[in-house]
């Protein structure tokens, strides 16, 4: 049986979750008891199978307790980005149909605005409750620690990070699955392909409100692993944790690779990471040179996949496959991939177009039938909005999001390639490339760059970076101008909020 309650019976004192910074732990026995009380509490609040809750909190043990409470009660749970404003939070809580919002004390100052916007939605706090909040811990202590009579598997209903518009949620339909049900995509990816099992120690460096980190830490507990959760990613701390806890599996995003590789060699190489068996990465395409350096450093243990919260398909590439097809995000594990043109006609191998999974899987964007319809070319054939091509062996290469394709003088330019080149420059810490208005060409290529040393910003550095790209890529792909920023708008999951930058340049 793949469920924490089973492992609570077999190994009650084994650590299920441990916070990396504070060292606080949650054993399987404790997780079983608390999640039983939480499930009882949800029923006490009138939330039955198919009902919904939302949670807003930083990475902490209570986050996992609440998710498992909902998961064994057949309840949908929506984790909300802790960087949103009250009106954005309220929109998601209302859109997902949550009857209860559970927060931590860190967000107590947002309670008045949330109370005003959410009306009848009850707000609970896992810490000392501020005015307007009920006490979640007090509710738990009143509940029995025995399983509820009607246990079913719940599921996450997560919202996109809004990199190209307002966050969107993926609707899930309640099914009376047993509590040990595992999403087939996760069983395939995390268990079968990555090998996470009861003997694994999984290190999670990302915020838990995002789909991949949350689903992987949930799946790891289903199979009885120990999960170490970082409060916040730091490159040297991450390496130290691998050595300290003999970590076997982890999941990262390419920006984390960049930050680790730019550590001084004396720092980067002093930690023993030999326990690592698999390092999974996703969320954004990884620059070819960055990934080569990571494989040279860590060995052929990197596993790359491409998927979305929609769970409509997945590709996967082992390190060996990637070295044979550099830059690829892998081959599909769930039916063929179709590359379609603007008329939704299939393109031949090597031609760039919209990427569609022909997996037979359907999904709906909550309360947005137009967005749902636009994602499908026909039943079971859908897109995440990315652009790419297939090589002769069926490996997928992503070029960018469709929304960020630059059309300059009638030529399509995909900014991902330029971003990947610029980030490899030793002076560059982070970069975004997008189109800005040009009276003659329609659009021209603009780069916004964060430097390792902000004092180097200026015309000389701008000219150096433009020349760097022009020496390595077609001149039409090189930025015509570069602006410098102290910080880039990235989510903690590594996704670039390019929309926020691009909007500044368009009237």
Image: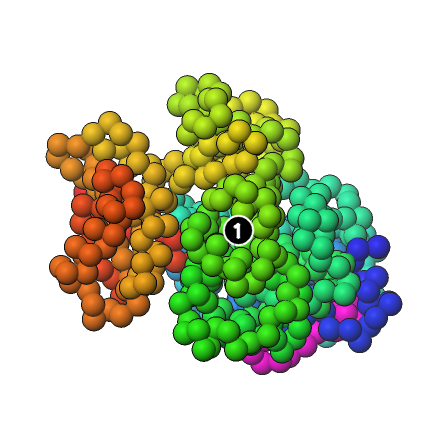
Q: Residue at x 21, y 51 (%)?
A: 466
Q: Which residue is mark 1?
A: 282
Expressed as whole percent of the image width and height from the top left, the position of residue 204 reads 59, 64
Q: Residue at x 80, y 76 (%)?
A: 13
When the figure is inspected, residue 95 is found, relative to residue 259, above or below; the finding is above
- Residue, far right: 10
Residue at (48, 54) in percent of width and height: 291
| On-image quarter of the C terminus | top left
Dot 1, crowdedness within 10 Å: few (<14), some or many (≥20)? many
Task: Estimate the x, y position of residue 383 in percent, counting from the top left.
Answer: 50, 33
- Classify 198 as above or below 310: below
Q: Quadrant of the N terminus?
A: bottom right
| Label 1 residue SS | loop
Q: Nearer the viewer, residue 324 or 72?
A: 324
Q: Quadrant of residue 122?
A: bottom right
Q: Is residue 123 magenta?
A: no
Q: From the viewer's perspective, is residue 6 above or below residue 105? A: above
405 or 69, nearer to the observer:
405
């Amino acid at each position: 049986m793949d469920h924490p309650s089973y492992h609570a019976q077999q190994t009650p004192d084994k650590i299920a979750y441990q916070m990396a910074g504070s060292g606080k732990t949650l054993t399987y026995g404790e997780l079983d008891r608390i999640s039983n009380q939480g499930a009882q509490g949800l029923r006490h609040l009138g939330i039955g199978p198919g009902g919904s809750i939302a949670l807003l909190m930083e990475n902490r043990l209570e986050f996992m307790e609440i998710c498992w409470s909902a998961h064994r009660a057949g309840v949908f749970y929506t984790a909300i980005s802790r960087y949103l404003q009250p009106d954005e939070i309220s929109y998601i809580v209302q859109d997902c149909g949550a009857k209860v919002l559970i927060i931590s004390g860190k967000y107590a100052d947002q309670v008045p605005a949330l109370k005003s916007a959410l009306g009848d939605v009850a707000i609970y706090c896992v810490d000392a409750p501020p005015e307007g909040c009920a006490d979640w811990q007090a509710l738990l202590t009143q509940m029995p620690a025995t399983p509820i009579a009607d246990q079913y598997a719940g599921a996450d209903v997560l919202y996109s990070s809004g990199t190209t518009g307002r966050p969107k949620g993926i609707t899930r339909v309640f099914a009376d699955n047993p509590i040990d049900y595992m999403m087939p995509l996760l069983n395939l990816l995390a268990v079968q392909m990555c090998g996470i099992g009861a003997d694994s120690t999984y290190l999670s460096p990302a915020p838990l409100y995002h789909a991949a980190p949350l689903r992987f830490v949930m799946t790891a507990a289903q199979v009885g692993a120990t999960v170490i959760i970082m409060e916040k990613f730091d490159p040297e701390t991450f390496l130290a944790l691998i050595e300290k806890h003999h970590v076997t599996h982890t999941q990262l995003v390419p920006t984390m690779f960049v930050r680790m590789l730019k550590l001084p060699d004396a720092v980067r190489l002093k930690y023993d990471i030999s326990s690592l068996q698999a390092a999974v990465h996703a969320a954004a395409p990884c620059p070819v040179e960055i990934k080569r350096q990571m494989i040279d450093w860590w060995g052929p243990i990197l596993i790359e996949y491409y998927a979305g919260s929609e769970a409509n398909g997945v590709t996967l590439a082992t390190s060996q496959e990637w070295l044979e097809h550099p830059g690829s995000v892998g081959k599909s594990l769930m039916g063929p991939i179709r590359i379609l043109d603007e008329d939704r006609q299939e393109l031949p191998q090597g031609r760039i177009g919209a990427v569609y999974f022909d997996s037979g899987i359907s999904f709906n964007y909550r309360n947005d039938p137009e967005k749902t319809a636009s994602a499908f070319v026909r039943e079971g054939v859908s897109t995440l909005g990315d652009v790419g091509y297939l090589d002769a062996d069926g490996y997928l290469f992503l070029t960018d999001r469709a929304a960020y394709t630059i059309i300059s003088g009638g030529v399509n330019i995909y900014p991902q390639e330029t971003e990947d080149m610029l980030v490899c420059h030793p002076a560059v810490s982070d970069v975004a490339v997008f189109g800005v208005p040009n009276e003659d060409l329609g659009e021209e290529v603009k780069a916004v760059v964060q430097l390792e040393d902000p004092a180097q910003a200026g015309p000389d550095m701008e000219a150096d970076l433009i020349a760097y790209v022009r020496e390595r890529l077609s001149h039409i792909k090189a930025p015509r101008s570069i602006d410098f920023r102290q910080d880039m708008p990235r989510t903690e999951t590594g996704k670039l909020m390019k929309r926020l930058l691009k909007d500044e340049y368009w009237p």
